[in-house]
Each structure stands twice: as C-alpha cells, then as structure tokens.
Amino acid sequence: MAVTVDGELVAFLVLSAIEVLAALMVVVSKKLVHSVFWLFITLLTIGAIYLLFRTEFIAFIQIIVYAGAVPVLMLFGIMLTRRKIMEEPHEPE
Amino acid sequence: MSGHLIDLLGWSEAIAGFLLWLLSLPLALGNWIALQVGAPSPGPLTGVIGWVTGPDLVSFLGVIIAINLLLLWATAFHLLIIMWIERKMYSRLQDRRGIMIGLGSSEILRRILGPIPLLGRPFRRPSHLGTGFLQTVADGVKLFQKEVITPAKADRWMFHVAPVVIAASTLMLFVAIPWSDGFWIMGSYETHFINGTPQSVPVNPWGILVILAAFGIAPLAILIAGWASNNKYSLLGGMRAAAQLMAYEIPLVLSLIAVVVLSGTLDPFEFVRDQSRPLTIGGLTVPFLPNWYIFHPALVIAFVVFFITIIAEAERIPFDIPEAEAELVEGWTTEYSGMRFGIVFGFKWLRALAGAALIVIMFFGGWDGPVFTTLQVPNLATLGAGTVPLPVLFQEFWFTVKIYVVFIVFVWIGWSVPRIRIDQILNIGWRRLVPLSLLAILIAALAGGLNWL
C-alpha cells in the first residue's frame, strides 16, 4: 500500500500524537484541574482532526460543545463537590 | 453598496513577492558569478531562484503576512483606540475633569464646534491642547517594564498557560471576523449570480460558528487562571466568570439561531449581502431603508437578547461581578502582573470589540453603507496606466464607524448602571434570557414560514 506523504498526512500524524499524549496525561496527572486541561487539549485536537476530514460543521460544533463546555462542567462538578481543591499553605491545627 | 478599499490577500501577496524577490537577489548574483567562472548555461542556482520566487512560496508567505497584518490591525491598533474611547466616554459621563479635558475640548474643536448653538456646548470648555491618546501607549510601555511575578504557591504551569489560551481564543475571534469584502483572511472566492450577472464574491460558510467556538473556549481558560493563582479571590472570580459565561453562551447561541433561521446562512459575507438589499417586510418595500435585521419586527427580541449576552460575554459592567474590584480585588486577574496582566485585561476589551463587530454584522448591516461618490485614481498595480475606482466612503470606514458606535453604547450602558449580584446575573441568564431567546426563535420561524422576510 503506497502512502503519499503530504501536508495533511503530517498534520494528521502530529495532531494524533498530541491527542494521544494529552489523553495519557488526563489519566496520569495528579491534580484534577490538570487532567481537565489535558482533556480540553484532547477534545480540541479531535476537532482539528475533523477539520482535516473536510467536515467543518462537526469540527466547530465539537469545539463549541466538547472543548468549550464539557471541561468547565467537569471542573464545576469537581470544585463544588470537593472540600479541598488545592493544598492549603498551612493547615490550621 | 460601497466598494472596499483594502484587498488584504492581494496586497499581502504583493508584499511577499517583493520580499522573496529581495531574497533572490543574492542568489541571482551568485548565479551570475558562477556563469562568469564558467558554469554550464542556466547556472547552478536557477532551480533555487525559481523555487524562491515561485507561486507556491509567494502565496504561502502572503497568507502568513495577511494573518499578521489583520491581527495587528484588529488588536494592537484598535485596542489602543477603544481603551482611549472608553476613558474619554466615562469621564464625560461622570464629569471626571482630569481625563475628559482632552476629548473634544482641544483648542481646534473648541474653535470649530464651540460656536454652534446647543450641539457645540460640550466643546466650549477651557482646554489643554492634545487628546490624551498617548496615555494608552504609555500604559502599555509601563506594563512591559513591570516585573512578571509568579506567586510562590501558584500552580506555575497552569498559571502561565491560561493567558496563552485566553489570548489565542481571542485572536481566533478576529481570524473569522471580516472587515469588508476584501479585508479578510478566512474564506474563499466563489462565483455568485447577482441580478443575473456572475460576480466573484467572498464566502466563508462557517464564519459565525468559528466565532462562537472562540467565545466558548474562554470560560475554561478563565477558570484555570483563577484556580492556578491559588488565591481565594482569584478562584471566586474565576468560578463566577465561568458560571456567567456558561449561562450566557446558551441565550447567545439561541438568539443567533433566530437570525440564522431567517437568513438561512452562517456566512458573515452572506449576512451582509442579504442586509444590503432594500428592506422588504411582508411583501412591502420600505423606502430608503436597507434590509438590516434590526429593522425587522420579528428579530427585535433576538436583538435585545443578543445585545445583553454580548455585554455579559465581554464581562462589561452590569455583568462584571467576576472582577468586582470592590469585593474581589481584581477578580481572576488579581495575581497577574506586568504584561501578562496586560494580556488578560486588554483582551477583555478585544472580546468586547469582537462582540460589537458580531452585533454589527448580524443586525446593523456590517460594512453596508451609502457610497456618495467614487473617484477615479491611477492604478498603482500597473504603474499608473489606467484608473481604478476608489470609493470615498469605503466599506472598512462604515464597518469601523459602526463598531465604534456599538462600543460607545457598551460604555454608555456600562458606566450608567450599577453592577448586579452574581445570583441575579445567573437568574437573568437562565430564567429570563433563555425563554426569551426560545420565543425569538419561535417568532423568527413563524415569520419565515409566513414568508415575511
């Protein structure tokens, strides 16, 4: 199978690499906010890959709905349900 | 419909061609020297010269130059002007003598406009010379000189990433906003039949969606910025900002759908082309009025909702509880210093400017405006041979004027009303604006079904 190397293939490979790495970072990150940020990067790169498929509508809807709204909803869920969201400088005794 | 002055992509390609020609000069010299010392006929560097001055590289560099020119025009230039306008306007509204002494009361304006009865009254004050415009430049220089401080307990990495995301998403807004039929970078030319004659017109089928996507990224970056500062005021400001932006994005999109239902497109160019026809309501043509959507009775509710949500998206004063400086120091921007503060703070103004541009494109006819006369000037592209038409009031002029008028209305509202509490903001957003925007969609769909437009 012959694969033509052009700009789109390179862009696809770079975006896929970023996406896979970011998806790994979602799982590996110690802090939840970091995970949410990497989730945002993952969803944004998926939108960019949709652009490579010439499906502009679904790409921009992906960015509006997934990259824009879902991470914020998750952050709200996390922040409003956990008592401690970041290490305190000094714990009161 | 007036013509456009600036052909951004064409001009940028001309600049790129010139730069690459300059770059190819030493190569051509080397080729000539090689030919003199006895190299075979076309010369060893002919291929490289052909590649450097070839169409591929010229168009690639042209697009990059066009992007930079448009972003510089939209951000650096207009940021200074809108900051200046805001200062001057609110000092007029609140009678702050120190700031307002510049605007309109400069000696020239006092002499020209002062004697006019009634209208000239604001200009009759004793004045200093100058307009105070350099104050904004001085602010920028001051911010550049300040130290960039990262708080000791901050989450360093996120703290530095958040302004980048905010700046990038704001610049993404300006990528999709065209300034005229020729001053844009996102889009392409297509041949449309207008009144039976084929014309090459710009199209960008998803322009409005790109703008919405760029507005949608901001809440996450703001929340991360507030969290990473590790300061309870920043975090509160960030939470408030994210909650507010999330709540107001829904009526923003819904009221936009009401317009899209009637116009049937998401293309900013198509919006403006549709609005430059004569106004027709229910089969009757209204004389002297263009088909701006603000004039349509079916879109009044959509306009009101859209206007309010744009003010909230830009975090301007009735809705600026995220940075309420009386209670939260400076909100989610508290811990940023130096130029990083300049970015996160200045780009709020830019989002207001982009919102004003969106309102103008959607409701006020974009760059449509009367053209009074057209001059014939020598064509520079052919070195003076032949003439090209130059409109006296071109599209960029109308678009910029309309944006500034809408922005001045933002300032007027912002400094006339008190800011409202966060729970009231969210109540207005979820309980009033969402049903109102649904009603706007219903009315627009009815009007479209009855063929009013």
Image (spheres, coloured by chain):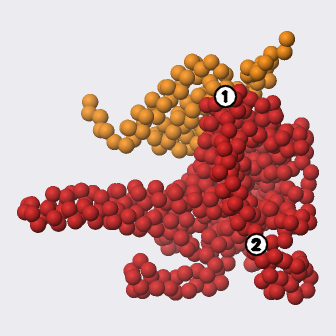
Chain colours: A orange, B red
- For image coordinates 86% across by 50% down, the residue present is B318
Residue B270 image point, x, y percent: 60, 61
What label sits on residue B155 in the rendered view? Answer: 1
Relative to B286, say whether A86 is above or below.
Answer: above
Q: Residue furthest top?
A: A93
Question: Which of A40/B85 is in front?
Answer: B85
Characterize the local packing of mark 2: few (<14), some (14-19) or many (20 or more) Cα atoms within 10 angstroms. some
Which corner quadrant holds the C terminus of chain B?
Answer: bottom right
Q: Which mark is residue B131?
A: 2
Please rate how many residues cluster around mark 1, counting C-alpha atoms within 10 Å: few if below 14, some from 14 to 19, many from 20. Answer: some
Q: Chain of mark 1?
A: B
Which one is earlier in the sequence, the residue at label 2 or at label 1?
2
Residue B163 in the image: x percent, y percent?
65, 41
State the residue at coordinates (26%, 33%). A2
Q: Name which residue lies at 84% across and 68% down.
A: B100
State the separation of the CA atoms marked 2 and 1: 42 Å
Quarter-of-image position of residue B32: bottom left
Does residue A42 show up? yes
Which x, y percent locates residue B267? 60, 56
In the structure shown, which secondary structural element does the residue marked by tag 2 occupy? loop
Give the amino acid type for the residue marked by disc 1 in the picture.
Asp
**Quarter that holds the N terminus of chain B:** bottom right
Circles 2 and 1 on the same chain: yes
Quick check: can you spot residue B453?
no
Residue B265 in the figure: left or right of residue B408: left
- Compared with residue B421, is residue B38 higher up or lower down, i.e. above or below? below
- How many circles with numbers are drawn on the protein? 2
| Callout 2 amino acid | Thr
Determine whether the residue tagged by mark 1 lies in a helix, strand or loop: loop
